[in-house]
Amino acid sequence: MYLSRFLSIHALWVTVSSVMQPYPLVWGHYDVCKTQIYTEEGKVWDYMACQPESTDMTKYLKVKLDPPDITCGDPPETFCAMGNPYMCNNECDASTPELAHPPELMFDFEGRHPSTFWQSATWKEYPKPLQVNITLSWSKTIELTDNIVITFESGRPDQMILEKSLDYGRTWQPYQYYATDCLDAFHMDPKSVKDLSQHTVLEIICTEEYSTGYMTNSKIIHFEIKDRFAFFAGPWLRNMASLYGQLDTTKKLRDFFTVTDLRIRLLRPAVGEIFVDELHLARYFYAISDIKVHGRCKCNLHATVCVYDNSKLTCECEHNTTGPDCGKCKKNYQGRPWSPGSYLPIPKGTANTCIPSISSIGRYSWCTCYHECARKR
Ligand SMILES: *[C@@H]1O[C@H](CO)[C@@H](O)[C@H](O)[C@H]1NC(C)=O
Ligand SMILES: *[C@@H]1O[C@H](CO)[C@@H](O)[C@H](O)[C@H]1NC(C)=O
């Protein structure tokens, strides 16, 4: 029942986006690449900027842990209960499904009780730091559209860095620092996103908002995309036109929300007291039940469909562009340099289609290029 409903909505959506509708159904959502219009010369295509829908991107990622053997349970070990650090007979055993906590459990469906989660080995080797890198890779540029939300099953770490890559993991930049004490951990003054403004929105901050303690109830860490959008679009994101206008004209801003990979660097587990309790090191570990990443394929405003095939995301390019991100003109359509579509003017934007190469015009019928050819005559 639910599935068939979903399918029919999906089918409708595909029809709308690929065939014709007089206008985009939703104002300024850029969900149609072209429509047919009538002119004195008959039916012609009208092209516009378009982009894929925003969706749950965790379905399409690969996850990698460093060190690779950091997941608990191989060999089996005991750890202390989350709410009660002196009840230390819980077991993690990788070879028993009910007692195993593999990384996939960070991306499965939550809403079940108890929740399922990934868990690291405990801090047996204290004082050697217990550090874990969790790298999420899409092998595709994606644009974040909502907050990144990490839900811990353990206490939230005392120190953590969220990093991003824009070049498939070759280079990394910090996105946000998290610590119980920013000055001590990273030599940074603590800040909150609310301290930023339109002019400082690209600043990389250290926040203490999400790192309070071992025993608190709150288990969630955010990377605040929406608060940053709100500097341009207003508190309820009502004025998306203003945001789109800024994204169009400021490449740095667009790149800020674009990633190919994310890395969560867990640097120090929740301790909660000044001293680590060396007699109960099985109290200290990381456990994550859920990671949310919402975004869309970056197709440079030249596609509404992004397909997942052979574990790879690819834009289905329109406007005679090609490449995984529609980042260049198709062969024989290089009559002017490639450029991305533009969100402006609102609501339909500008397609900036690729046009036939001069040398190949003769080989195509006049009507494939009637605008350009009419101008040249
Ligand atoms: C995590 O990644 C960083 C680079 O982003 C690297 O310097 C560090 O050694 C890695 N840590 C682990 C535990 O692999
Ligand atoms: C792209 O090229 C095809 C022919 O291969 C043509 O029919 C179509 O109108 C072109 N689209 C755009 C947006 O220029």
Image (tube, rainbow, N blue to C red):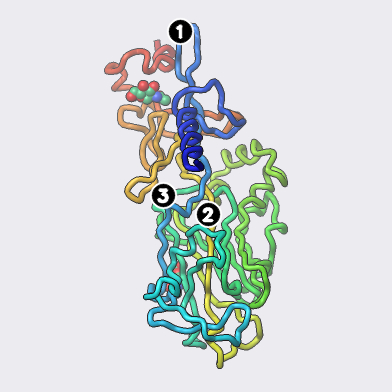
Q: Is residue 167 shown above or below 285?
A: above
The amino acid beneath tag 2 is Val
The amino acid beneath tag 3 is Lys
Q: Is any atom of residue 356 visible in this view?
A: no
The amino acid beneath tag 1 is Glu
Check disc 3 and report the residue beneath it: 140
Gap between marks 3 and 2 measured at Cα: 14 Å
Which is more N-terminal, label 2 or label 1?
Answer: 1
Q: Which image quarter: residue 224?
A: bottom right
Q: Residue furthest left?
A: 363
Q: Closer to the camera, 357 or 351?
A: 351
Q: Closer to the camera, 367 or 357?
A: 367
Q: Is mark 3 within 8 Å of ligand 1?
A: no
As drawn, is 249 to the left or to the right of 360?
Answer: right
Which residue is pictured at 37% across the width and 17% down the height? 368
Nearest to the eye among marks 1 and 2: give it: 2
Q: Position of residue 319 (x, y in %)?
A: 42, 29
As drawn, is 254 to the left or to the right of 218?
Answer: left
Gap between marks 1 and 2 measured at Cα: 47 Å
Are the two marked residues, 3 and 2, in contact with CB atoms closer than 8 angstroms? no
* Residues packed near mark 3 inside 10 Å, few (<14), some (14 to 19) or many (20 plus): many
Q: Is any atom of residue 197 visible in this view?
A: yes
